[in-house]
Image: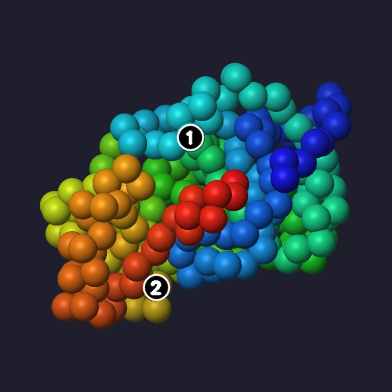
């Protein structure tokens, strides 16, 4: 269910495409209730992006940090996921400080293409070929999630995994439009390389946001 946030004219605003209470569909926290805050704006430009309407920040209304925090507090869940677009186009320290002060866990999904900001309980790093990630994300990430679109992405995934901390959780996720072609390859790869796990976009199978 989408959440309606009453807009004001406060300072320190962020462009909001949508916010909604759902169940995390991807990665280690799959199946956990979570409130998603999807910020508008992205300059990475993945050709297979399924939320291209998020790219233009000017197309989305801006809301104050207090409004975003208050809306998250009202959801009665522990996890707040900041996503996009590319959320780290913005300095997110004030937003994460507010969320954590409210007793909420801060998660982010990012390509790592922009400087890291904010205080995070969980950082999902999903590098993209369309814009190189910054080096700081390799050691800061809790989860490396590589989208598999074609066979060459396995080698590309290993190159990124080699730069991450030993404690990082490694996931391979089929790009949705090519899941039927890529899934058998991913299954075979994980069998041979068990440090990797499979991430699925389970929310799409369940037909939820």
Report whether residue 144 is seen. Answer: no
Can you give x and y, in whole percent of width and height, for residue 167 in the image?
A: 40, 78
Its colouring scheme is rainbow
Report whether residue 200 is seen. Answer: yes
> Looking at the image, which residue is at 76% across and 63% down?
77
Q: Which of marks 1 and 2 is nearer the N terminus?
A: 1
> Looking at the image, which residue is at 53% across and 66% down?
30
- Mark 2: few, some, or many residues within 10 Å (few <14, many ≥20)? some
Can you give x and y, in whole percent of width and height, for residue 127 in the image?
A: 34, 50
Mark 1 touching mark 2, by CB under 8 A? Answer: no
Label 2: element kind: loop
Task: Identify the image quadrant of the N terminus.
Answer: top right
Q: Estimate the spatial distance between the alpha carbons at disc 1 and disc 2, rounded to whole Å.
A: 27 Å
Can you give x and y, in whole percent of width and height, for residue 168 in the image?
A: 39, 73
Residue marked by disc 1? 51
Residue placed most toward the observer, 2 or 124:
2
Label 1: element kind: loop
> Looking at the image, which residue is at 49% across and 50% down?
204
Residue placed most toward the observer, 172 or 63:
172
Q: In this view, which residue lies farthest toward the top?
A: 58
Above or below, 195 against 174 in this view is below
Above or below, 6 against 37 in this view is above
Closer to the camera: disc 1 or disc 2? Answer: 1
Residue marked by disc 2? 168
Q: Quadrant of residue 59?
A: top right
Above or below, 196 against 175 in this view is below
């Amino acid at each position: 269910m989408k959440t309606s946030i009453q807009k004001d004219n406060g300072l320190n605003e962020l462009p909001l495409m949508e916010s909604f209470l759902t169940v995390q569909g991807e990665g280690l926290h799959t199946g956990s209730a979570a409130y998603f805050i999807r910020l508008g704006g992205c300059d990475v430009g993945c050709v297979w992006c399924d939320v291209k309407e998020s790219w233009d920040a000017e197309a989305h209304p801006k809301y104050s940090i207090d409004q975003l925090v208050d809306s998250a507090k009202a959801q009665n869940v522990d996890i707040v996921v900041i996503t996009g677009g590319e959320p780290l186009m913005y300095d997110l320290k004030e937003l994460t400080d507010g969320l954590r002060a409210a007793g909420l866990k801060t998660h982010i999904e990012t390509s790592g293409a922009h400087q890291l900001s904010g205080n995070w309980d969980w950082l999902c790093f999903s590098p993209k070929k369309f814009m190189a990630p910054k080096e700081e994300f390799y050691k800061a990430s809790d989860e490396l999630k590589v989208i598999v679109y074609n066979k060459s992405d396995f080698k590309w995934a290993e190159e990124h995994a080699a730069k991450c901390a030993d404690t990082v959780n490694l996931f391979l996720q089929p790009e949705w439009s090519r899941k039927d072609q890529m899934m058998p390859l991913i299954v075979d790869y994980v069998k041979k390389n068990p440090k990797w796990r499979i991430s699925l976009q389970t929310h799409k199978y369940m037909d939820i946001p």
